[in-house]
Image: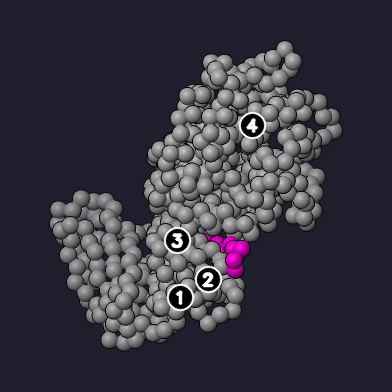
Amino acid sequence: MRTRTAALSAALLGALAVPSAATARTSAAPPGIDAPPMGWNSRALGCSVSETAVRWAADALADGPLAAAGYRYVIVDGCWTAAGRDASGGLVADPARFPSGIRALADHIHGKGLKLGLGLSAGTKACAGGGAGAYRHEDADGALLRSWGVDYLKYDWCSIPAADFPGKNVQQIAQILYPAMRQALGDGIAFAMNNEEGSTVPWLWGRQVATTWRTNVVTKPLTDSYAHMVDVWETNMLRHEYAGPGSWNDPDLLQAGLGKMTEREYRAQFSLWAIGASPLILQADPAKAPAAIVANPKVVAVNQDRLGVQSRYARTDGWYHALVKPLENGDSAVVLFNESDRAATIAVTAAKLKPPRAPRHRVEDLWTGEVAATRGDLAAYVPAHGAVMYRVATRDAGGDRAAPLVTLETDPAATLGEDRLTTLTAGREGEIVTRLVNTGGTEKLTGAEIALTLPDGWRARPVTPAASPEKLAAGEAFTVTWAVTPPAGAAAGRYEIGAKASFDGRAEATSSAAVLVAQAP
């Protein structure tokens, strides 16, 4: 939760001499990069990385849907440098792992229409693999990387000889070493500061130097874990004022395709990274990265929007978050994120979103493609660990023909924040509630009906009418109570119940919720 990370940030700031936030925000960004970098990083391979593996990844990136979606950088994270330098002091590629050298690798990658990235340490040694670092070789190494055709440098913070900087704290040392390499590289090369333990507080001064900088405080590289992803994201949100355009906060790599989180959780991460103007750097095998998530063109467009602004909180309430990001053409992107373990309605008013004044707004769900209309307020019934992503426009573009935005709840908690799931007993009737709300309010809803979708063998009957004879005005709700019976032989565990609503004879809405089944005593 943000309480812990905010406290740690305050402790770091108190211990370090830092430039003012105003100074950091107005500094000129390095020219040449106009949107957050997108690509693939070899970190998941560790020191098993090789020239063959990187060429294969580049081919998979170029030949599949990812390059077309905007993924351009192929980044060798580490373990590519030899332990020593050549006779003239230059960097040398590890001959066992990269026998053809970096220039040949760059040529192959450029021939695919892609760009090459490398990882290198600002210290005396690489972070892994025992290779050389760039310390005291910045000018020569920067020139060499450029001559090789390198397009992106991930500059790590390992083996830093602090004793060479008497009287300097960690941040001050970083503000010597990072600009030296930035200047040596020149313009047009993406420069990613990977000082991820946070002691250098790069978000306060990174815009003077870098394309991106890590925003972690004490966490090491992001693991394929929902809890760790949320923690890193919340920390990143604390730095939103320092990002863009031209330079961005970097909460770490994308996890989609690694396999330890659910599809819903990967979609949530991608939504949060996209609206946050974060770099979209994959680490899963490009052939296995779920294109339906990471190559969604409308979500990617939000990330790559040239206004370059990171999202801010329109609302945050414990486990429930509404984020808004202005876009170059006057639209807004909105993400409703449910951090909790139970589905919940997340609502945010027009006063919090601050869209341009208009009688109605067009709302497009960027994951489903559904279009609705609203007078300004937004809401969605968001599944546990899930995110809903909207693009909101004041232009017509079909909005006048769209039905009002609705919220369909399946088994909502009695109070927001109640995390425990409803428990039903096998072979016995239990109560489930569904509720349809006219959130958009652009017109009244007529002919509303709700039906349940149940696991095989389950039964349900409406206790209250499942069709409404009334018209639903803005903000009004139609509620149906159901008697639901799991089969007598149902195994104890977690099950999904769905609901489907229809209204106006032209629109539908769906939602679902998890319930628990217990055996009868």
Residue labelled with disc 2: 393
User: What is the x, y in percent for residue 19?
Assistant: 80, 49
The 10 Å Cα crowd at callout 3, few under 14, some 14 to 19, many 20 or more, is many
Q: Circle 4 — which element?
A: loop
Task: Name the amino acid type tagged 1.
Answer: Gly
Disc with the residue nearer the chain's start (1 vs 4): 4
Residue labelled with disc 3: 366
Q: Circle 3 — which element?
A: loop
Figure quadrant of the C terminus: bottom left
Residue labelled with disc 4: 149
As measured in the structure, the alpha-carbon distance from the residue carrying label 3 to the one carrying label 1 is 15 Å
Asked whether the beta carbons under mark 1 and mark 2 sit within 8 Å of each other, the answer is yes
Task: Name the amino acid type tagged 4.
Answer: Gly
User: What is the x, y in percent for residue 377?
Assistant: 50, 75
Q: Nearer the viewer, mark 4 or mark 2?
A: 4
Disc with the residue nearer the chain's start (4 vs 3): 4
* Magenta stretch prevailing secondary structure: strand
Q: Circle 2 — which element?
A: strand
Q: Taking 126 as reference, is 425 above or below it?
A: below
As measured in the structure, the alpha-carbon distance from the residue carrying label 3 to the one carrying label 2 is 13 Å
Q: Single out the residue that lies furthest toward the front.
A: 111
The 10 Å Cα crowd at callout 1, few under 14, some 14 to 19, many 20 or more, is many
The residue under the point 54% across, 63% down is 333
Span shown in magenta: 321-330
The 10 Å Cα crowd at callout 4, few under 14, some 14 to 19, many 20 or more, is many
Task: Name the amino acid type tagged 2.
Answer: Ala
As measured in the structure, the alpha-carbon distance from the residue carrying label 4 to the one carrying label 3 is 36 Å
Residue 493 placement, left or right of 23: left
Residue labelled with disc 1: 399
Disc with the residue nearer the chain's start (4 vs 2): 4
> Residue 150 in magenta?
no
